[in-house]
Amino acid sequence: MTFLLANWRLVLLAVLLGVIGVQTWRLDRSQAEFKALEASFEQFKGSVRALGEKAKADVALQQAKDNERKAKSDAENSKTRRDLSGVYAAYRSLRDSRSSGGGGLSAPGHAPGDPSRTCFDSAKFGAALRRLDEGVLGIAETGDQAIADLDSARRWAQGR
């Protein structure tokens, strides 16, 4: 003990050198671990970058497929609409030729044979029927076009 008290400077120097040695060793080990972590982080960033690029390519491919299906669906839809408009144009033509060509209502007799029978003014009744026919035709045409649009949208969605 007297040696330690007499040589306290040497003991303090030895302890300081020991502490410095331990801290240097710990620093070297921490730097090695940091370099290993840094390398694994760079590898992780590279894999994430590669996954991101793959996801972008997948999205672009899916978008191209979707655009192709949409174009095909739009073409089918416009063909269906053209077909429907042709059908309705033919129906209108037939209806107009029927009403203007004398194919409408026959003229009523002079006097009803039975008082329970009622006679209508054939011009007014024919005009009312034409208006009703036009209204029903407009509703049917709108409904058919909506059905065609929904069918093409459904086919497109089923393709996804």
Image (cartoon, rainbow, N blue to C red):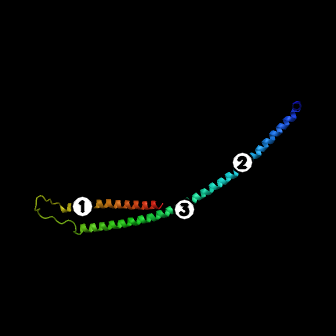
Tell me the residue at 39%/62% (across/down): 148
Tell me where residue 123 appears, x and y as whole percent. 20, 62
Return the mark for residue 34: 2
The residue type indicated by label 3 comes to: Leu
The image quarter in which residue 17 lies: top right
Q: Is residue 154 above or below residue 30?
A: below
| In-front residue for pair 27/112 | 27
Tell me where residue 34 appears, x and y as whole percent. 72, 48
Tell me the residue at 60%/56% (across/down): 51
The residue type indicated by label 1 comes to: Leu
Tell me where residue 114 appears, x and y as whole percent. 10, 60
User: Rounded to the nearest whole Å, what is the CA distance between mark 1 and mark 2?
Assistant: 90 Å
Look at mark 3 in the image and give the residue it sits on: 61
Return the mark for residue 129: 1
Q: Sequence-wise, which precedes: disc 3 or disc 1? A: 3
Q: Residues within 10 Å of mark 1 (few under 14, many from 20)?
A: few
User: Rounded to the nearest whole Å, what is the CA distance between mark 3 and mark 2?
Assistant: 40 Å
Tell me where residue 69 appears, x and y as whole percent. 48, 63
* SS for dot 2: helix
Q: Are marks 3 and 2 in contact (CB under 8 Å)?
A: no
Tell me the residue at 81%/42% (across/down): 21
Q: Tell me the mark number nearer the camera, choosing from 1 and 2.
A: 2
